[in-house]
Amino acid sequence: MFVNISIFPYPKRQMVSVPGVLEIHRVYRQCLQCRELIHPTDEMLGQKDRYTVGVRDLAFFAAADSSFDKAEKRLLKFCGLKIAANTIKTLCDKESVKMKKWQENNPQSWKEFVETEGEIEFTTDGTCVKGGALVVIWLKGRART
């Protein structure tokens, strides 16, 4: 159960948007049990995260054909956005879960890939060390003949 609260000064929230960092001050709702502060429209508008939909789209585009390090440099050079490579990776990982669900529920999304002739092959996108373990990210692809 949530109740409206008025805290002065209002808790501020920072969001990274395409024009820059926004600082938002507003009334929140608070859960009586866990004390979490929420604003009901955030989830409906796709603003549950710190990064706006526009910034996330730019990050995905910047990382689509290269490493996350290159994506970080591209965002800074072309958009003036300073987002760390690991943050871009995290954003892409979160989005990939949504994409996987969409693909599972929409067979048309992968029909062309399955019907395309050629050998299935894979390439590595990059590596990183996490907790002492080497993590390799693999991408599947199909070579056209």
Image: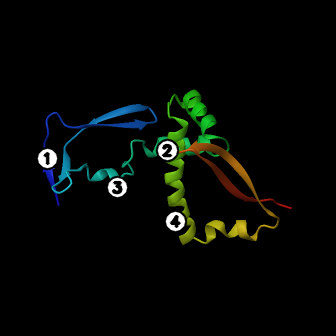
Q: Is residue 107 above or below residue 41?
A: below
User: Mark 4 or mark 3: which is in front?
Assistant: 4
- The residue identified by callout 1 is 5
Numbered tag placed on residue 101 in the rendering: 4
Q: Is 74 in front, or is 54?
A: 74
- The residue identified by callout 3 is 44
Q: Position of residue 109 (x, y in %)?
A: 62, 66
Q: Residue at x 67, y 41 (%)?
A: 66
Mark before the other along the chain sequence, 4 or 2: 2
For the residues bearing labels 1 and 4, Cβ distance under 8 angstroms: no
Q: What's the residue type where badge 4 is placed?
A: Lys
Mark before the other along the chain sequence, 2 or 3: 3
**Mark 3 crowdedness (10 Å alpha carbons): few <14, some 14-19, many ≥20:** few
> Is residue 122 visible from the viewing direction of this image?
yes
Q: Residue at x 39, y 32 (%)?
A: 21
For the residues bearing labels 4 and 3, Cβ distance under 8 angstroms: no
Mark before the other along the chain sequence, 1 or 2: 1
Rendering quarter of residue 63: top right
Location of the N terminus (image quadrant)? bottom left
For the residues bearing labels 4 and 2, Cβ distance under 8 angstroms: no
Q: Position of residue 38 (x, y in %)?
A: 25, 50
